[in-house]
Amino acid sequence: MIKVCHITSVHNRYDTRIFLKECTSLAQAGYDVTLLVADEKPPEVKNAVSIISVAGLLNSRVKRIIKSSKIMFNKALEIDAEIYHLHDPELLPLARKLKRKGKKVIFDSHEDVCGNILRKQWIPKIIRPIVFFIFKCYSNFVFSKLDYLIGVTPHLVEKLKISNPRTEIITNYPLLNLEDNNIERSTYNTKSFCFAGGITEQWNHQTILSALEDLDATYDLMGRAEPGYLSKLQKSNSWDKVKYHELIPQQKVMEILSSCSVGLAMLDYSENTGGKIGTLGNTKLFEYMQAGLPVICTDFLLWKEIIEKWNCGICIPPGDTIPLKEAMQRMIDNPDTAEEMGRNGKRAVLEEFNWEMQKNNLIKIYKNIKEHL
């Protein structure tokens, strides 16, 4: 049995992409899978995946970036896997060390890290271009030495292929959770819009609240928000229309989604989305569709193609209150159309945009590597 080790110094041990999708799928395919994390919790076996942890990385971003590769290297060697699958950019030095030991190494890029450096608030603005240049040169060098690169969306894959032609796409399409799929939807006449996820400025919540001022509707807002940004939102004239749920279990999230009318995914254009191209690495659009919700979302080329093909929502530019308000009013005024869009979106996920399709791509990568062991 081929031994595989996934490593993350950042993500939760039950991270949906790393643990639930990739590690669990590999274990089901007959691989001996270990997940190495940094959360100081005891070891366990879950979904046939052995989860172990190293201590000392969580409390400081700088410490994590500087020390994560060194601290995790010894533990990674103890595991003695044939294939290592890394998920964080600060682990690139670890990737080089493992290659020198004759190991097969995959790097899984969850986002356009290099492009995002220029937007990182914790890096002083004056040195961001320098950090960007250094990281770009170093990452391209390391990427060229690895056995495979994985990207979550087409424009990122094309960037990675410049460094290494052995690059494949594994998107973040949702798992087909039968329990969630069987939740019955409530009426579409509730006039309730919703958002579930990290509550940050890039999702245009201030624009949404501005659009809500003149609408007879409510907004279910689910997720953790930074105190400063939450304070800004709470000062909005329409905050009394918001039902804020900070930290709730996933099952409760699904129940709330099933009682709402429309899911909102108004993500800004950015380096990580390839500008107006869009990303398949973000799950929000597909999670709304899976829940049977019609969507109002950013007019990314990738998202617009899906929405128009399946007739499951409305695409508009981000950051503009007027077209957003018009789209929201259209959904309120046409509940039958909204309901049909919701059914179409759910069918799209069941037939096309789900993890089962991506799992096959992942297994194919591992089979290719196994042939060269």
Image (cartoon, rainbow, N blue to C red):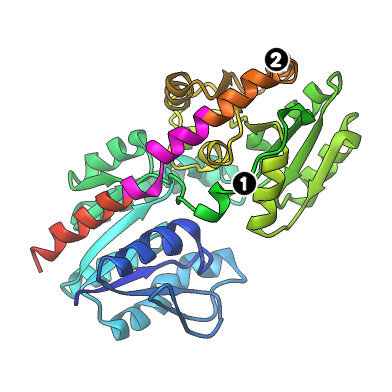
Residue drawn at (32%, 45%) of the image: 357
Quadrant position of the C terminus in the picture: bottom left
* x 53%, y 41%: residue: 290
* Quarter occupied by residue 313: top right
Q: Is residue 137 visible?
A: no
Instruction: Name above or below for residue 65 compared with residue 174.
Output: below
Quarter location, residue 7: bottom left
Q: In 3D space, how far apart are the residues under numbered discs 1 and 2 (Cα atoms)?
A: 37 Å
| Range of magenta residues | 344-358
Q: Amino acid at mark 2?
A: Arg
Residue 88 horizontal/vertical position (percent): 42, 59
In the image, residue 38 above or below residue 120? below
Determine which residue is flagged by label 1. 121
- Foreground pick, 73 / 78: 78
Left or right, residue 91 beside residue 120: left
Left or right: 310 in relation to 341:
left
Mark 1 / mark 2, whichever is N-terminal: 1
Vertical side of 77 occupied by 37: above or below: above
**Horizontal and vertical percent position of residue 337:** 62, 18
Magenta highlight on residue 49 = no
Residue marked by disc 2: 330
Mark 1: amino acid: Gln
**Callout 1: SS:** loop
Callout 2: SS? helix
The single residue placed furthest to the left in the displayed view is 372
Is residue 198 positioned above or below 336 on the image?
Answer: below
